[in-house]
Amino acid sequence: MESLFFYLFAALAVVCGILMVANPFSRNPVTSAMFMVLTMISLAGVFVLLHAYFLAAVQILVYAGAVMVLFLFVIMLLNLKEEEKRKPGWVRMGFGLVSAGLFAALLLRSVAAARNAPLETAAATVDGGVKPLGLLLFTEYPLPFEIMSILLLVGMVGVVVLSKKELK
Amino acid sequence: MNYGELLKLLAPESILALTLLLVLGADATFLSGRAPGLRRAVAASLTVAGCMGAIYWIFFFPIHGHLFSGVLVVDPLTQVTKQVLLLLTAATALLTLETAFTPHVGEYFGLQLLATLGFLFMVSSEDILTIFVALELASLSLYMLASFAKGNLASAEAGLKYFLYGGLASAFLLFGFSLLYGLTGETLLAKIAAKITTTPRDPLLVVAISMVLTGLGFKIAAVPFQLWAPDVYEGAPTPSAALIASGSKLASFFLLEKMMTIGLSSAVGSGAFHALAAGWVPMLAMLAGLSLIVGNLTALAQTSVKRLLAYSAIAHAGYALLGVIANSSQGFVALLFYVMTYGFTVLGAFGVVAVVERQTGSDRLEAFAGLSRRSPVLAGVLFVCLLSLAGIPPLAGFFGKFYLFAAILRAGAPSLGILWLVILAIALSAVSLFYYLQVLKQAFVREAPLELPFSVKPSTQLVLILLALCVILFGCAPDLLVSKLLLALKAAAPGLVF
Amino acid sequence: MESYLSIPHLLAVAGDEKIFGWVTPFVWYSAIKVLVAVGLMLTMVAYTVWVERRVSAFIQDRIGPNRVGIFGLLQPLADGVKSFLKEDFVPGHVRKVFFWIAPGIMLLPGLLSIAVIPFGSKLGEQDMVIANLNVGLLYTFGITSLSVYGIVLAGYASNSKYPFLGGIRASAQMISYEISMGLSVIPILLIVGDLNLGNIVAYQGGSLWGWFIFKAPLSFVIFAAAAFAETNRLPFDMPEAENELVAGYNVEYSSIKFALFFMGEYASMIAVSAMMATLFFGGWTLPFFGLDQPATTWLGGLLHIAIFLAKTCAWIFLMVWIRWMWPRFRFDQLMDLGWRRFIPLALANIVITAVVLWLKA
């Protein structure tokens, strides 16, 4: 049952991810944004299967509910037109295909290797609830937590500067 | 768990953060509406004071310790590196006085401080979670700094390009880190290394390493992840480009070295041409070789000095990678010496470019014509810096390269399998002399149509002269810095054998 | 071949543990709870519309719909039939796909968010909550935050000025007030120490003063205001301010699609009222006659559900009442109130609560 749901959510996330960047039917930015929302929601589903409930809820609350709404907001305000199709040059296509192919081969090999000998992945050490997460953040990882707050300050300062109209 | 101890160990960073708030606050309150020159002067002096305060703190209160078993590492080596990083930022702040591209003075200096905070955190952590967050802090600040000249399309392009490529690189890095975490269940570098030895080398590890290298390769601008560098160096405001070229390079290389030698110490491999073995060394050797070739050869064709410096930065990333590839304590010291002196040198070069650009409105080669007569000081500084970049004795650049070659050869001994890379590096070093001399030829031989003397701010002159003196000093007496670094490394990691 | 498709064989397969092993009693009970809750919710939506029309008429000294059935009680049915039978007109200039999915998205969040709200104590052995989530509160906020998509997409898909402005206003307003709404309940989390809505309700049992409206009055005020803004009700109904935007984001819609928007709004209004009852008014508990303990009898269980519904309905009534009594804010006033008043207030509220709790500990 659980693995069925995993495959469902994983497939949904991958398919929506692909449709987000390379949708053969529509090159409308709003469509892409909506597929990104679906990707986020599918990922939240995967988090639930991993018992990371807090992360799942926050994923929906922050990414699907706030970040993507802002994306849509900006896209609508800018009134973006349909993306034009561009033909990439042969050299670029070649390089891209070669490196993507190599990477895919590597990934496939690791999948094949895992099929023969199941990977020894580390078991979850922490329950995904709010309390263990909070404890971990404030006992073992207060430093990254504090750095995050400075990171948000950077974002704030930067956005104010970059988006402020220059008064002449 | 003790928050007091955390605060004590993070005192320099705290000083910097307070300075940052002070700079932002002062500019927003009692300086708002004043003349931009005054605001720049106040902000710059606050920034320099903050950096100097942090340096003094480190100097007079040399406390060391590991917190949370490696999330925060404060040892002599990180402290020395932090001092150099702070010096680089202070010098950049003073050079910023020479430019007048933005009315948002407080924010500009604030972002420089924020980027520096990011560098400091990058240096002082051995935990992939913290490393990633610190790296993002530094990167995000640098993206902003690159696009800060809002009226300038090139700056916007630089910022956007840097941001897009950087975002992609961060995604790769995060994917690599998450694979490492998935394989080992640890976030601390040392523990990751311990876990990796127990499992047989599996392809997923190779994926993880290549993703981490993609992410970090972007930060150090190694080929083939260098595409952003020329446009960013050219389009970004000159002080931003200087910070990207100096401080960011130093912090990123320190991080790369730690990531590879501690976190992936059990997946080294070999880059010797007759005994290639999978691991990070052959990957880095390839990046180094490509960077050397592409950087040096493309620099030959440049007419914009900032672009030329960008390609030379790519080439220098190739040289510096030799230190990482050596995978020894000697290599670590050589790398640090090289990147630190490179930081001073490139900052000096960018300082000269900033002045020339402000006075002539261009950074083309022709703009440098007659520099030796228009401003002998600038020409002298440019002379020292470019020759050091080319690796001419007795300047710091020469000894940097010398130590790097010695370290990698000693590490590869007795088989000398990695010799191919060293030969390539030396050969291309000779090529690089050509394009540095092109600039110097303009400055010293060509005549400008209008040879008015340049007006250079005293602060700029002071900084540039100090930087040039540093380059000469570390060239004539490299042992001053090297012995300090060696001692620090010994104290930081007594287990490493020399 | 036939034997595989024969009914006895299919039944045998269906009874096989491997295929339908997951249909445990838990699944059955959950399915029943979901059906009942959604059915009740949709009925309430229909009658909230009726209540709104009657109350507004009463306030404006009119009569309101009183012809279909006694007191006009069958009016919602008539409305439903009417909107189904009307021509579903799709203007030529709209973006078809989004135009079709927007009304559907609109109705979903309201229905989904009741999944974690405990609407009673116990009925027999069963907890009267569909999903007893540890992160229940976060879940409701997450789902509520999705409700903006319906409006935004409708505004975008309509491809004309008024709906577009309505959509833009809606997204700006809902994002802004989501923040103060989220911040306003943090003091409650600090006091209870849990995100599970069932535990939050249990904590409020005991005495009337245990209700969070008395324990965290500032939270209540901010949450209430944000709730009005989130549901686009007056005094914050900018997205469809009819004298400015005709009808806002749903100008181009007609027939059943319009009805879906209408229902979506009322569904989210009911969901918010249920949250309000749960968070600030003790949920299904009453501090008298031992009604704050989980029920042991069926009668007690039904009584608890009734108490919860009564509290919810009281809030719905209040929201309707306010709509017809208050004027509308201006958009800049709305934003100013959200960002410059409520958010700092909510932050101060958190800090004060934390300090008080720290001093008490």
Image (cartoon, rainbow, N blue to C red):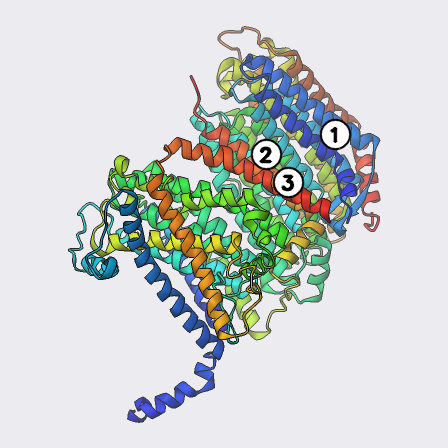
Find disc 1 in the rendering and name its residue: B54
Q: Secondary structure at mark 1?
A: helix
- Position in image of residue A11 (x %, y %): 43, 64
Q: Residue at x 62, y 12 (%)?
A: B457
B392 with respect to B67 (left or right): left
- Position in image of residue C27 (x %, y %): 46, 75
Q: Are marks 2 and 3 on the same chain?
A: no
The chain that hosts pointer 3 is C
On screen, residue B280 above or below C327: below
Find disc 2 in the rendering and name its residue: B313
Camera-nearest residue between C56 and C245: C56
Q: Amino acid at mark 3?
A: Ile
Q: Secondary structure at mark 3?
A: helix
Camera-nearest residue between C323 and B56: C323
> Of callouts 2 and 1, which one flags the residue occurring earlier in the amino acid sequence?
1
Find disc 3 in the rendering and name its residue: C352
- Kindly report which numbered mark, 1 or 3, lies closer to the viewer in this rendering: 3
B412 with respect to B101 (left or right): right
- Kindly report which numbered mark, 2 or 3, lies closer to the viewer in this rendering: 3
Q: Secondary structure at mark 2?
A: helix
- Position in image of residue B453 (x %, y %): 57, 7
Residue B469: image tag = none
